[in-house]
């Protein structure tokens, strides 16, 4: 079946009925100067068989390699039950739950998700999710400007150790609303946000400070000091957190004396496969005091007139539901199916399971760091504690080394030249999915890429 199942005759009948000769005429009020014209890079339509073959060929390119790339998307083990259940028709094809009486199952899943995320982040409220972590951060910035009425500022402090794609997305979304993101440098030795750099802004008006924990480099920041400093300056605190790390690290709701005000991040580690880049989902939580400024929808639990439990759309401040000028956001739909998988994942794993995943990932990182420490031309870029990611410094261009590792079936990491100008550095990640043998293969591939010496293994040479 074609995507839009209308024949040419049916389209002509509809146009004749409303009195226009073509679809172009139907939209003739749009100025020609802003029309995109023909889409040059969109290929023509193909049949189902050809489309499936194309997707299968693309998927095949992702198979057969050991992946140590993190940089915002992480390969974790997902129990088989998660997607066996999520793939059931009532979940996979469920539509937006506008009619509560017909959507109790969907609403309950989202309510359970919200409860788990609020607990994981130690925040008061969670919404039903965002598009992804990057757009979630942009929405958090917009939210902070609305919520921090005392500051009356349209500026936000954005450390440069926040994910570069998050910062890019954020700039794209908020700059059109005349909000300025002020770059804060990090300490070159530790990779942490510099409190000394922040002190340069004392006494100025800012709506919020963004704090990533762990930051893009995997480095753990001084969240207590940063949070207390921001609050002392009348700023809100926006936390950007890897949800897996929260099974071990202090949750944002408990940062400093008052806790972060808004918490956002990428939810993909919670049961969503890498899938060549998506779809993923973003989470967003906040304090009760500013919940009215939260974009998206919030599901609530109540009882009906007969005392039976029911689930409802408690808050949905979207442009579809209220006057467009009063809406908090028009980019606030929730990623329902991915959230369903995340809810199942967290339910199956429990607090203990999430903790084991986080600890195993951290322990594997220590093993990986030890395995490459004796390789000539390899060093750690930062001296700070990290969570399941680390920046590795080489004595030659990192991208060339990563390309050579890929030829040996190892996707070694993410080169940092483009984003930070470090030609010889790359970010590598390891999770609980990697074995000791995988770590040896990583070290061996790295050594071979650096030296060209393929004789023996790292383990054999140490023996």
Image (tube, grey):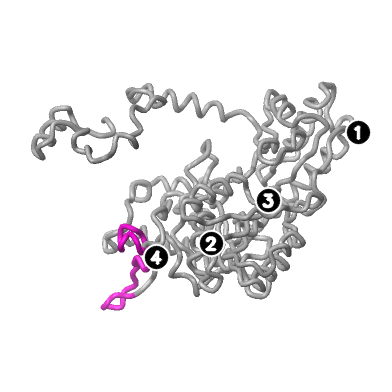
Q: Nearer the viewer, mark 4 or mark 1?
A: 4
Q: Earlier in the sequence, mark 4 or mark 1?
A: 4
Q: Nearer the viewer, mark 1 or mark 3?
A: 3
Q: Residue at x 61, y 57 (%)?
A: 241
- Residues at marks 1 and 2 touching, judged by CB atoms closer than 8 Å: no
Q: CA distance from mark 4 to mark 1?
A: 59 Å
Say whether residue 76 is visible: no
Q: Earlier in the sequence, mark 2 or mark 3?
A: 2
Residue 161's label in the rendered image is: 3
Q: Which residue is mark 1?
A: 463
Q: In this picture, which residue range is highlighted in magenta?
A: 303-326
Q: Which residue is mark 4?
A: 299
Q: Residue at x 83, y 43 (%)?
A: 370
Q: CA distance from mark 2 to mark 3?
A: 21 Å
Q: CA distance from mark 1 to mark 3?
A: 39 Å
313 part of magenta stretch: yes
Q: Earlier in the sequence, mark 4 or mark 2?
A: 2
Label 2: which secondary element: loop
Q: As displayed, is residue 177 above or below residue 12?
A: below
Q: Earlier in the sequence, mark 1 or mark 2?
A: 2
Crowd around label 4: few <14 · some 14–19 · many ≥20 (10 Å): many
Crowd around label 1: few <14 · some 14–19 · many ≥20 (10 Å): few
Q: Residue at x 52, y 39 (%)?
A: 277
Residue 413 % position (x, y): 69, 36
Q: Nearer the viewer, mark 4 or mark 2?
A: 2
Q: Quadrant of the C terminus?
A: top right
Q: Which residue is mark 2?
A: 154
Q: Nearer the viewer, mark 2 or mark 3?
A: 2
Residue 315 % position (x, y): 38, 67
User: Is 101 in front, or is 419?
Assistant: 419
Residue 112 % position (x, y): 45, 63
């Amino acid at each position: 079946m074609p995507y839009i199942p209308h024949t040419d005759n049916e389209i002509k009948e509809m146009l004749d009925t409303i009195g226009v000769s073509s679809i172009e005429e139907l939209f003739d009020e749009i100025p020609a100067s802003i029309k995109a014209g023909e889409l040059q890079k969109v290929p023509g339509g193909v049949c189902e068989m050809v489309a499936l073959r194309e997707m299968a060929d693309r998927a095949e390119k992702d198979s057969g390699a050991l992946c140590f790339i993190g940089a915002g998307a992480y390969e974790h083990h997902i129990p088989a039950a998660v997607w066996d259940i999520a793939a059931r028709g009532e979940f996979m094809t469920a539509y937006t739950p506008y009619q509560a009486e017909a959507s109790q199952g969907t609403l309950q899943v989202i309510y359970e998700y919200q409860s788990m995320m609020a607990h994981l982040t130690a925040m008061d409220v969670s919404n039903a999710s965002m598009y992804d972590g990057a757009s979630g951060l942009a929405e958090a910035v917009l939210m902070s400007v609305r919520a921090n009425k005392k500051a009356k500022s349209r500026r936000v402090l954005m450390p440069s150790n926040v994910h570069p794609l998050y910062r890019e997305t954020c700039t794209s979304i908020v700059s059109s609303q005349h909000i300025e993101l002020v770059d804060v440098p990090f300490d070159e030795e530790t990779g942490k946000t510099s409190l000394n750099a922040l002190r340069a802004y004392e006494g100025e008006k800012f709506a919020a400070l963004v704090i990533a924990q762990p930051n893009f480099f995997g480095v753990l920041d001084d969240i207590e000091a940063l949070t207390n400093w921001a609050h002392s300056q009348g700023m809100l605190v926006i936390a950007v957190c890897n949800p897996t790390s929260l099974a071990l690290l202090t949750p944002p709701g408990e940062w400093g004396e008052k806790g972060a005000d808004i918490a956002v991040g990428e939810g993909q580690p919670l049961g969503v496969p890498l899938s060549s880049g998506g779809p993923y989902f973003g989470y967003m939580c906040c304090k009760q005091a500013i919940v009215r400024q939260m974009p998206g929808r919030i599901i609530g639990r109540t009882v009906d007139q007969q005392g039976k439990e029911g689930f409802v759309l408690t808050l949905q401040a979207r442009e579809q539901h209220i006057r467009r000028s009063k809406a908090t956001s028009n980019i606030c739909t929730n990623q329902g199916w991915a959230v369903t998988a995340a809810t199942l994942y967290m339910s199956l794993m429990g607090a203990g399971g999430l903790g084991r995943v986080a600890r195993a990932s951290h322990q594997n990182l220590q093993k990986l760091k030890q395995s490459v420490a004796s390789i000539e031309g390899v060093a750690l870029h930062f001296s700070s504690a990290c969570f399941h990611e680390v920046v590795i410094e080489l004595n030659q261009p990192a991208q060339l080394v990563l390309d050579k590792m890929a030829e040996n079936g190892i996707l070694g990491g993410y080169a940092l030249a483009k984003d930070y100008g470090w030609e010889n550095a790359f970010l590598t990640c390891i999770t609980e999915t990697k074995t000791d043998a995988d770590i040896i293969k990583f070290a061996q591939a790295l050594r071979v890429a650096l030296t060209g010496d393929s004789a023996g293994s790292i383990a054999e040479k140490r023996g």
